[in-house]
Amino acid sequence: MSRSTRAAGRRAAPRAGRSRPRSHRARTASKAIGLTLVSALVPGSGLLMGGRKKLGAFVLTLSIGLLLIGAYVGLTHRDSVLAIAVSPRQLLIATFAVVVLGVCWIWVVIASHKLIRPVSMTYTGRLAGSMVVGLLCFAIAVPTTVAAQTVMAQRDLVGSVFQSEGNSKSATRPKVTNAKDPWEKIPRLNLLLLGADDGIGRTGVRTDTVIVASIDTKTGNTSLISLSRNWMRMPFPADSPLHKVYPDGFWDPSQGNIEQPEYYLDAMYDNIPKAHPGILGQTDNEGADAVKLAASAALGLDIDYYMQVNLAGFRQIIDALGGITVNVNYRVPIGGDYGQGPGTNGHKLPSGYIEPGPNQKLDGYHALWFARGRYGLSDPSRQERQRCTIHALVNSASPQALVTSYQEIAKASKELLRTDIPQEILPAFIQLALKVKSAKVTNIDLDKNKNFPTGKNPDYTAMQQIIQKSLNPVAGTPTAKPTKKPTTGTTKKPTPTKTTATPGTAQNLNDACAYNPNETGTGN
């Protein structure tokens, strides 16, 4: 046999390695499409069916391993997940990992279909296969993109709102000594919540909402203390530079014992930085630090951090969550102005009202007015509605709402939330927030009729005694027994009946925010 004949024979004989994958191909286009779908649901299975056994086994093992590791970490190492969620650097790595996994998944689907499809296909079969593969790739790309955008939104939020201790300045916050367990020596964390009203047409920034949340760091049980917007003579700690300027509290003695709106609590945030710029030293928010110092001295509590929300942003966050559900016990005005006090635009009647009713679903606009409406109503009723709004907001923040609307929530929060909570303690802060969500939330009644019937001269000493008694109850004091649940009867959930709190005591917010149509909101 000549050399040319032997060479021709070798060229004519098929190679075993090239023909092997053909035996794994589907016989019909429809079957190939079905197997491609399986390969998308179980990455690696399509490569195995197409004859790439080593590569398929590797991809399948890797996919199962990542799923098991993710489940294990999510169930047993929640602290690690939370630490990633509040670390800008780790969030950037997580974004990269999500994109890489999505691209690899798409490649596996395309490669599997190429190995599985028949060698000879009609034009219709090729078109159908290409469309199915395109849809599968789209179905993978969309959630991958959304996940990457959500992670980047979280990174942007953390980096914009929460600065590291070294990159931010505060004249009042405590120094972080143990970032892993910052509450090791802090039995109660006191957080100042500020609602800043700096809307269009308003002069300056007023903190119409001032609430102190005192949180038990072991249990998450929280007591809310509302401060009245028209308190005068707000004291300052003896070692504060502001105490030297206002030794008898924040007011002007030369005007006499009269109402002084420019020295109300809600005017302090704006007026002190204007009158005494830099008096507290280096700080990123002198107004918030001034209110923190005054609230600490007035209530007898060491306030650790503040969180400030612009009321317009509050509306956006509630809309992103899909609204909140509250009990409206009396007509709440929308708008209206008495024409007195700082930032007023003159007397104006309300443009409308939120009508009474149980379990009302309010959007952001109406929830904002439910919390701040005061025309014709008393300050204590307004403070109670603000606490109930916070309570409803916490209850509305379900995992489903956070997942579906997180980018909108993050965008609103980034633009309209300010705080001096440092990045270093965010993981511990989130852990504490999870405790608060499932713990008991109460309101401490400071007894308005006795301690501040007007704002001119509140009895801060008496308030401090009430607060200490509520936060540190005497051992052995009997507590109210819960009402027994009926064992029989209808399955309809009854509307909760509101109980009246005794002045100077703590009241559970579930009771305080229950429906009671007998309330008037006027203090009568």
Image (cartoon, helix red, strand yellow):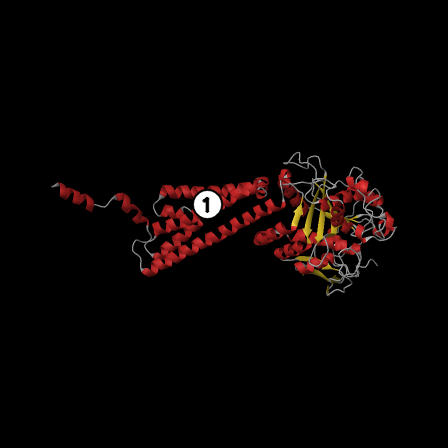
Crowd rating for badge 1 (residues with CA inside 10 Å; few <14, some 14–19, many 20+): few
Residue at position x 56%, y 49% from top?
A: 153
Image x and y of residue 518, in percent: 79, 61
Q: Is residue 156 left or right of residue 296?
A: left
Image x and y of residue 520, in percent: 80, 61
Instruction: Give SS at disc 1.
Output: helix
Query: Where, quadrant-wise, is the C terminus in this rendering?
Result: bottom right
Q: Is residue 355 left or right of residue 429?
A: right
In front here: 43 or 23?
Answer: 43
Above or below 253: residue 202: below
Rendered image quadrant of residue 356 = bottom right
Image x and y of residue 35, in percent: 39, 52
- Residue located beneath label 1 in the image: 100
- Residue 464 visible from this viewpoint: yes
Query: Where, quadrant-wise, is the N terminus in this rendering?
Result: top left
Rendered image quadrant of residue 77 = top right
Rendered image quadrant of residue 419 = top right
Above or below 78: residue 386: below
